[in-house]
Amino acid sequence: MNIVTLESGPVDTNGYLVYDDKAKIAVVVDCPYGSAEPFLQLLCEESLQLAAILLTHSHWDHTADAPTLQKMTQAPIYCHAFDEYRLTNPMEHTLWELPFEIESMNIDVYLQDSTTISFSPELTFSVIHTPGHTEGSVCFYSESESFAIVGDTLFQRSIGRTDLPGGDMETLLHSIQSRLFPVDESTVVLPGHGPATTIGEEKMYNPFLQPSFFR
């Protein structure tokens, strides 16, 4: 299993190319503005077939180049149904004016909580629905490889915003504590912005997830 992090777009969003080097199968998780061409170059360099574009949620900074990459590769787009409305009308949900247009897109495969999506024996994920940042936020967890790509649900020493439409602080904290924290503490957390961390580190040090935060 190989993971390449590609940071791009106006708010430094992380997109991930995850691939099985033996099967030559890959997925892209989140596709920020300006990432389609670099992702395509990586796919070509490694002679990979792109099996899917997986979206952790539908905020524009994570999805802007998904339609472009889909046209280049014909890969289906996976997302949770609760976040579909931002994909079909992306420019109506950017909150501020962007200097570029985002094409509307359709969900080809609807992600469902507690299901498994598999593209090769190694390239297999459990889908964990973690609402709170958006209604349909999901995390992609690989138990065998001990990592989770979590979008804007959890960051190093922080959590996703909940002051945007569709966000809710109580829901997000519950999602993290009940859905992410039960996985192995050594699990590497790959977030939508900023550096990687681990479940164990965030249990210990994340100020938003300490008992004192709830007093």
Image: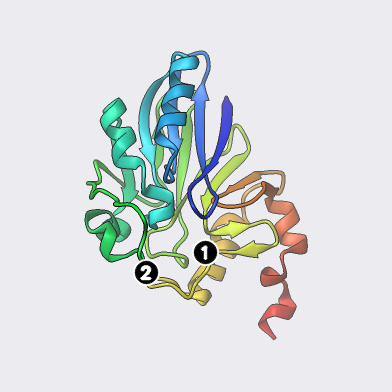
Q: Nearer the viewer, residue 162 or 12?
A: 12
Residue 213: image quadrant is bottom right
Residue beneath disc 2: 95
**How many discs appear?**
2
Q: Which structural element holds mark 2?
A: loop
In the image: residue 28, left or right of residue 1: left
- Quadrant where the N terminus sits is top right
In the image, 10 versus 123, the foreground residue is 10
Q: Secondary structure at mark 1?
A: helix
User: Badge 1 local density, few (<14 within 10 Å), some, or many (20+)?
Assistant: many
Tell me which label, 1 or 2, sits earlier in the chain. Answer: 2
Labelled pair 1, 2 in contact (Cβ < 8 Å): no
The x and y percentages for residue 47 are: 44, 13
Q: Residue 6 shows which numbered tag? A: none
Q: Amino acid at mark 1?
A: Ser
Answer whether residue 122 is visible to the viewer in this image: no
Query: What's the CA distance linking mark 1 and mark 2?
Result: 25 Å
Q: Amino acid at mark 2?
A: Leu
Place of residue 31 in the rendered image (x, y in percent of width and height, measured from the top left): 42, 42
Residue topped by disc 1: 175
x 72%, y 60%: residue: 203
